[in-house]
Amino acid sequence: MSYLSIEHLDMSFVRGKLASQVLRDINLGVEQGEFISIIGHSGCGKSTVLNIVAGLLDPSLGGVILDGKEVRGPGPDRSMVFQNHSLLPWLTVYENVAVAVNKLFKRSMSRSERREWIEHNLRLVNMGHALDKYPQEISGGMKQRVGIARALSMKPKVLLLDEPFGALDALTRAHLQDEVMKIQKDLGNTMLMITHDVDEAVLLSDRIVMMTNGPSATIGEILSVDLPRPRDRIALADDPRYNHYRAAVLSFLHDRHRLQ
Amino acid sequence: MNANVKIPAPLAQSAPPTPGRARRMATAVGLFGLQRLLPPVVILALLGLLWELLCSGPGAALPPPSVVLSETWELIIDPFYDNGGNDVGLAWQLLASLERVAYGYLLAVIAGVALGVLIGQSDWAMRGLDPLFQVLRTVPPLAWLPLSLAGFQDSHPSAIFVIFITAIWPIIINTAVGIRNIPQDYRNVARVLQLNSIEYFTSIMLPAAAPYIFTGLRIGVGLSWLAIIAAEMLIGGVGIGFFIWDAWNASRISDIILALVYIGVVGFCLDRLVAFVGRRITRGAPAA
């Protein structure tokens, strides 16, 4: 049994008399410390998979088992980095992380330990200099860093990333990708990321889950990315193995499962 | 809400003031006065002049500003006299009205936010209560007065009730809209953190809806001030509304004009006060 196990997931949305099947028979096992990307064309239901793992949506059939326990509803053991950061605008950077830490570790940590833990997580994403800034005062990339710090501060078993860099410009995106890789190397988090960016998937992942097009989308293929870590984007750009993986994902998305 | 207001250059910096600095500062303050204060002063002077010209002739129905000023000079310089009964200074009259507004408005804030949260949260409550609210909110404030006099058998609680029932509708409706507009993302954050309903209420719902709630509070305070003047004209006693009615009965037109100025200024201050508190609490966060 894998650390995180997604089993026979079916998802249908019913609106009136019309039922539309979004996902069909999704099966995936994720090992502890693994970085998995789920890639597919927009509308293929990849975000739905992530929301089911997060517990924000209930599947029509099947289920998710994390560390031997069935997932029922959302919880901090599966913290999420949202695409649009979803920081609370009335709280400072520090307070946005504090809201999570104070709720989850009120009993297990003293006040000063919590303070130290909050600042530690913000330093981890290089936001230690902006603790008292409000979200509207910092850039999009910085907001996403705070979102990542908030998710990490919950000490999740799995970190769920829903197109975390999708709204960022290319340079900021590359920078944050490198930081996520470094964090994962240091902390050994299990991560599940949704993306539609082929380079991002190959660079970050241990395995890439490629989804077929909806309706009734399912897993078409799983590609193991056997590149040594730490990975360096500049060195990899000329690496034939990297280009081979890249070509494999591209051919899946654009030859065999072209969006109609 | 966040109008791009020009703010005068900050005074008193830690660096020692140099002549150039002081001059720049003086220029900035002077510029501010020129741009912001001059236009309203000029317009006010022109309108006053026009009023003086129109009302100075023989047979004019209303007194010109010069007469108003001389006739009400005693009231202006001594707002705190107290000759017993209704014969007290304008400050006491205004404070009596403000006290009624404070009671009625505070009750409306508490009940209005609570009801707004209820119909914002629950579809059932929304469907059940919204039609009722939509009908009741169109009832003019003074139409409630006879009913509340009959119910309370006393003028003081009746006036407070009229304030309450006037101010509560915009507060309910805006609060409900604010609650309904809380982005799904914030709800998801709360769900991942497994916040209980009290934590959700205080740390997500109220701050997220605060910009909307304060819009309602601002409309509500304006309406209360409108309603109290009208209600006091009918119920009597001490209060700026009754002062006007009393002045009309005694044909002291100048007193009425002075009272109107005071009412306008106080209403303006109330509106700005609520707006200021709102800005402090929401920290200028946009309403979305």
Image (cartoon, coloured by chain):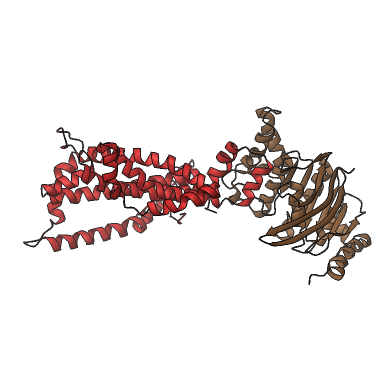
Chain colours: A brown, B red
Is the C terminus of chain A in the top left, top right, bottom left or bottom right quadrant?
A: bottom right
**Residue A221 x/y as whole percent:** 89, 59
**Residue B233 x/y as whole percent:** 21, 46
Q: Say which of A205 and A12 sits in front.
A: A12
**Residue B225 x/y as whole percent:** 31, 47
Query: Residue shown at 42%/47% (left/top)?
Result: B217
Residue A189 in sight from this viewpoint: no
Is the N terminus of chain A in the top left, top right, bottom left or bottom right quadrant?
A: top right
Query: Residue shown at 64%/53% (left/top)?
Result: A139
Relative placement, left or right, of B4 versus A59 is: left
**Residue B71 x/y as whole percent:** 12, 48
Extreme-front residue of the structure: A17
Query: Residue shown at 27%/60% (left/top)?
Result: B42
Relative placement, left or right, of B140 versus B9 is: left
Count of numbered labels shown in the rendering:
0
Relative placement, left or right, of B157 versus A30 is: left
* For residue B54, above or below residue A143: below
Extreme-bottom residue of the structure: A260
Q: Say which of B85 and B126 sits in front.
A: B126
Extreme-left residue of the structure: B58
Relative placement, left or right, of A80 versus B48 is: right
Residue A252 in sight from this viewpoint: yes
In the figure, residue B112 lies in which quadrant? top left
